[in-house]
Image: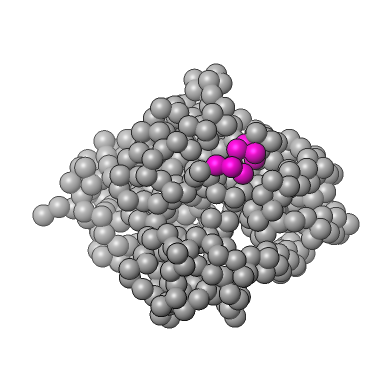
Amino acid sequence: MNKKVAFYTLGCKLNYSETSSIGRMFSQAGYNTVDFTDTPDVFVINTCSVTENADKKCKKIVKEALKVSPNAYVTIVGCYAQLKPKEIAEIPGVDMVLGAAEKFQIIDHITDLTKKPKALVLNQPVSEANQFVPAYSFGDRTRTFLKVQDGCDYSCTFCTIPLARGASRSDTIENVLKQAADIAASGVKEIVLTGVNLGDFGIRNGQREDKFFDLVKALDEVEGIDRIRISSIEPNLLTDEIIDFVATSKRFVPHFHIPLQSGSDKILGLMRRRYKRNLYTDRVAKIKAVMPDCCIGVDVIVGFPGETREDFVDTYNFLNDLDISYLHVFTYSERENTLAAEMTGSVPGSTRADRSKMLHILSEKKRRAFYETQLNKTEEVLFEGDIKEGYMHGFTRNYVKVKAKYDPVLVNELKKVYLTNISSDGDVEITEAEEILVH
């Protein structure tokens, strides 16, 4: 009887793509992938290090895993495993910890599933994680997260990702196109491009060989994929040529997610971001000039060291005035071995929480305002297979979330619908199911 393996992923879309690729390795080795609660023989937990909360979650997941299957072999991989291997090894029940350079050799390392008194730690310096390992998520028929870039050469003072994932490196355009064709052949309709610093695509062996724009142009020609979405791109790397190309593209959708982190130039300087807020204003204006209906998402951090009330109000007003569609709000948390952790002017936890709440409310206001501009339009929606209280959901090309009465025929289908009104839960409602197809 084949051994059973279960996976749990914390963190970003990049982690999800890598977990999925590791899962395929287990399948090829004869394992059956099962749900977390289905008494697996092996648990693989892919960790994140972006927030302190992710560290605590890792400990909790291990504890829950051992309740489900007390004799299971527990392996921890991912960013937290690279940064804190000794701490993870001391979590009761953990059997193996694999760093950034070792996680893709997991099958070679899992040879004996006997639990030992002490965890095995395989963790080279992050400088050894210098090879690009392709990955993409699989299993969600609607969309696939395709990893095209890894690592980061930037030195933002709050971020541990360069310490956890190493230097910037990328796949070749030729290999990305091959994977995109494989994904298309599986019936997936949408690809989401992912990476640590996606706009920095093109570095191999420490040398720049391609540009992200070259990849975008090449992917636009891939047959069989209806939509390609850019997951996140730094404002200083989002060029006019990329924006203009997406505006007339066959497959790239009018949706950008652009990290800002702060609307205060003082705080941006302390963060060592590679732009001032004027550049961000310029990028939003350029997008809206050529794609008025484009959805723009923003990452922002509250409570960074030295952020005064005036700095926060500056950020709030800046975001309030921008023509953006939603926010991803992160509450700053101190990370070891980062410059920000040594800075003066720590913001009290309660103040961080208050500021976070204010920006979450602003995000909902922005989302609703954006959705209202999209009402009374006919849009193409890609429907997903989820069912919640008799309804299913889908997204327009410009990332408006719509709901419709569940119909299995619509799953993974692109359909033109008429956007009528915003429901009480914030999603956009469309015409009734029998009128759903607008030809």
Q: Where 293 falls versus 180 (above or below)?
A: below
Q: Is residue 17 visible?
A: no
Looking at the picture, how far across and down is residue 204, in whole percent? 49, 23
- What residue is rendered at 49% in x and 72% in y? 403
Looking at the picture, how far across and down is residue 224, in whole percent? 37, 44
Q: Is residue 266 left or right of residue 423?
A: right
- What residue is rendered at 40% in x and 33% in y? 177
Q: Nearer the viewer, residue 96 or 352?
A: 352
- What residue is rendered at 71% in x and 56% in y? 324
Q: Is residue 355 visible?
A: yes
Q: Point out the image quarter for the C terminus.
A: bottom left
Q: Where 16 falls versus 150 (above or below)?
A: below
Q: Which residues are magenta?
A: 242-249
Furthest residue in direction front, as rendered: 439
Name the colouring of the figure. one colour
Q: Point out the image quarter for the N terminus.
A: bottom left
Furthest residue in direction left, as rendered: 1
- What residue is rendered at 55% in x and 49% in y? 253
Q: Is residue 335 left or right of residue 405?
A: right
Determine which quarter of the picture holds residue 410.
bottom left
Task: Assess whether residue 21 is covered by the magenta stretch.
Answer: no
Looking at the picture, how far across and down is residue 33, in whole percent? 25, 55
Furthest residue in direction right, as rendered: 310
Q: Nearer the viewer, residue 329 or 2?
A: 329
